[in-house]
Each structure stands twice: as structure tokens, then as C-alpha cells.
Amino acid sequence: MTEMDNVSIKVIEDAREVRSRNIQEAEKRAADIIADAAKKIKQKNNEAKADADAHYKKTFDMEVFKTKSEFEQKVLLAKLEIIDGIIAKAQEKLAGLDRKGWEKFLAKMAKELDIKGGSYTIGKKEKVLDEKTASIIKGVKPGQKKADFDRGLKIIGGKAEIMLSPQNYLDMDVEDLKMEIASFLFGGGQ
């Protein structure tokens, strides 16, 4: 072998060594880049999972709140319907008062309102209430005017005009009555 051949072989071997080192360095850099990328991917994945979990919890809590609110609203409406039904039945019962019921009602109202005189008019559609029943209120006399209302007894004395009927009496206090019924039936008036 000639010297030239030896030099050529040496150059080729050196080139192979350089190439081998370059490949090893490139593989090490590639492994480091891949490891770093895998670490970043894992970190991003964990952040995305945490964000998704937080979004899920927020959405879940909002849906639970919305469903609970809708349910509570339906329960409240059902309670109000029950209360309105009770009041409607009470009004029906009051509309059908007999003579004794009217006498008790008029005596109570005359005492509560301190009615001592005036003239009265009986509603156009009253069947039970008559002059004899109205006379339970001491000091009131039949009026001359025709009734401009359907139910009850209107007493006019001085500048005061008092409309007496069980329905009107109930209607005046209907909101307070609703609260009392709600409190009795459902505890707390809700």
C-alpha cells in the first residue's frame, strides 16, 4: 500500500469518526428535543385538562342551579295555586251565606267599624240579605237610591260610604290572608 493509500484510508476513517460523532450528537439533540417536546406536551395537556375540569364544574354548577331554580319556581307556583284555590273556596262559601251568617257578619262589622247611623242600600243580586237582616245594624235606615252594585250592603252616613260584603271583607285582606295560609300550610310563608 502506498502512502497515498494510507492517507486516503486515514482520511476516510477520520471522516467516518466525525460522521459517527455528528450522528451521535444529532441523535442526542433529537432525543433532548423530543424529551423537551414530550414534557411541554404533558404540561399543556395537564393545563388543558385542568381548564376543562374547571369549565365542566362551572357548567355543571350552573345547570344544577338553573334546574333547582326552575323546580323551586314550579313548587312556588303550585303553592300559590293551592292558596288561590283555598281563597276561592272561602269566597264561594261567603257568597252563599245564609240569614244567620249575614246577621253575624253585619253585627261584627258594625262593631268593628263603629257604625252608628246612616242609610243603606242592598245589592241588586242579593237573595238572602233583606231589610230585616240589615236592621241588625242599629241606627241605619233603608236608603232611597237604587243599588248600583250586585252584592253586599252599602251604608252611607255623612261623608262616609261603607261597602259591606263578606267577599269585599275577604278581598281587603287577601294578601295578608295568603301569607297566613302559606305560613300555616307550608311553614314560613314561601
Image (spheres, grey):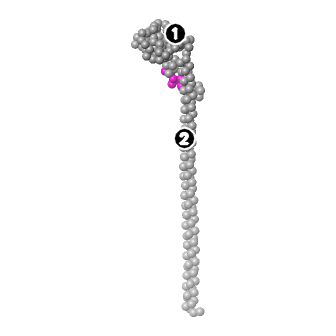
The dot on residue 133 is 1
Asked which quadrant contains residue 145, the reply is top left
**First-in-chain label (1 vs 2):** 2
Q: Is residue 173 located in the magenta-colored stretch of the structure?
A: yes
What segment carries the magenta color?
Answer: 172-179
Q: Main secondary structure of the magenta part?
A: helix
Asked which quadrant contains residue 160, the reply is top left
| Above or below, 13 relative to 186 | below
Q: Is residue 164 visible?
A: no
Residue at 57%, 30% in the rendered image: 79
| Above or below, 44 relative to 96 | below
Q: Is residue 27 left or right of residue 120?
A: right
Residue 141: percent from left, percent from top: 45, 7
Under mark 2, the amino acid is Lys
Residue at 56%, 45% in the rendered image: 60
Check disc 2 and report the residue beneath it: 66
Which residue is nearer to you in this view: 167 or 12? Answer: 167
Asked which quadrant contains residue 118, the reply is top left
| Local SS, label 1 | helix
| Above or below, 175 relative to 133 | below
Residue at 55%, 29% in the rendered image: 81
